[in-house]
């Protein structure tokens, strides 16, 4: 396996009894993805995405289809060797509350396991949904500062009302990581863990 996209995922996407297919996205999904995500963005519920951004990040995405209709999406974005973010999660209004969101999150969490991540997090307005799919609310400060890089261009940057949620996949490693002192610095305009701390963290298998 070269990436998290296994042959099995391509050949055997998740098919539910309602004839809904959940699979990794491909470039031909970009146009319907833009419609789905940016409809919610226009209502202030999600962050808008451009065609360029989607193209660049298409390997992060999962899509759910009913026949030819895109009915849901979500993405796993890597932040560090141990952390990933669930983002751009959306289910079409017409298909909400039929278990599609759960199917997509399950696929993303399986992928995070395949990549050996310790935990996945999300920033959300729907903590109730994330609680149902195994996430817990946490203080934003518990997340790596690098997670805030998207926030800098968010219109709600100074008035953020999103809630941080986390699902730990490797409890022992996660606990160990919490006990390592964190010191942050700026590298290439992005806030990151300083190298000395990275090395120390490496001693803890992080
Ligand atoms: C949030 C969203 C993805 C949920 O998708 P969905 O397909 O409707 O969710 P599911 O049907 O899989 O629901 C799974 C469980 O969560 C619950 N749930 C769904 N939406 C919920 C909500 N807004 N608040 C609380 N619980 C919710 C369901 O009742 C279900 O519970 P159950 O297992 O006890 O039956 C969808 O409402 C959506 O696209 N919202 C707009 C975009 C958005 O807010 N995205 C999140 C960005 S982080």
Image (cartoon, rainbow, N blue to C red):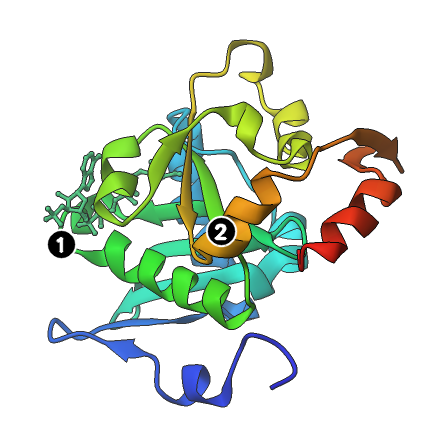
Q: Nearer the viewer, residue 56 or 190?
A: 190
Which quadrant holds residue 131? Answer: top left
Q: Give coordinates of residue 119: x percent, y percent.
A: 49, 51
Q: Is residue 1 above or below residue 63?
A: below
Q: Identify the residue position indicated by label 2 in the image.
A: 119
Q: Give coordinates of residue 67: x percent, y percent.
A: 24, 73
Cβ of mark 1 under 8 Å from ligand 1: the answer is yes
Q: Are marks 1 and 2 in contact (CB under 8 Å)?
A: no
Q: Give coordinates of residue 189: x percent, y percent.
A: 85, 32
Question: Dividing the image into 4 quarters, which one contains the C terminus?
Answer: bottom right
Q: Would residue 159 be found to the left or right of residue 22 on screen?
A: right
Residue at the image point whose x is 40% and y is 61% from the top: 109
One can see residue 164 in this view: yes
Residues at marks 1 and 2, CA–CA distance in whole angstroms = 26 Å
Q: Would residue 138 be found to the left or right of residue 157 on screen?
A: left
Q: Which mark is residue 98?
A: 1
Q: Which mark is residue 171?
A: none
Q: Nearer the viewer, residue 114 or 64?
A: 114
Q: Is residue 73 above or below residue 18?
A: above
Q: Would residue 193 be found to the left or right of residue 137 on screen?
A: right
Name the mark nearer the viewer: 1 or 2.
Answer: 2
For marks 1 and 2, the one nearer the N-term is 1
User: In terms of image quarters, where does ligand 1 lie?
Assistant: top left
């Amino acid at each position: 396996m070269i990436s998290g996209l296994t042959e099995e995922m391509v050949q055997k996407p998740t098919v539910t009894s309602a004839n809904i297919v959940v699979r990794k996205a491909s470039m031909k999904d970009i146009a319907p993805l833009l419609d789905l995500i940016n409809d919610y963005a226009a209502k202030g519920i999600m962050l808008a995405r451009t065609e360029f951004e989607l193209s660049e990040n298409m390997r992060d995405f999962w899509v759910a289809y009913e026949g030819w209709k895109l009915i849901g999406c979500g993405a796993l974005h890597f932040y560090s060797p141990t952390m990933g973010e669930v983002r751009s999660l959306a289910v079409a209004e017409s298909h909400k509350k039929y278990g599609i969101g759960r199917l997509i999150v399950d696929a993303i969490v399986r992928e995070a396991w395949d990549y050996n991540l310790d935990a996945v997090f999300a920033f959300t307005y729907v903590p109730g949904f994330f609680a149902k799919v195994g996430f817990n609310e946490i203080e934003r400060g518990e997340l790596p500062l690098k997670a805030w890089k998207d926030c800098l261009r968010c219109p709600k940057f100074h008035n953020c009302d999103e809630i941080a949620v986390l699902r730990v996949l490797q409890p022992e490693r996660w606990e160990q990581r919490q006990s390592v002192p964190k010191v942050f610095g700026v590298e290439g305009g992005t806030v990151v863990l300083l190298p000395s701390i990275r090395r120390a963290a490496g001693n803890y298998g992080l």
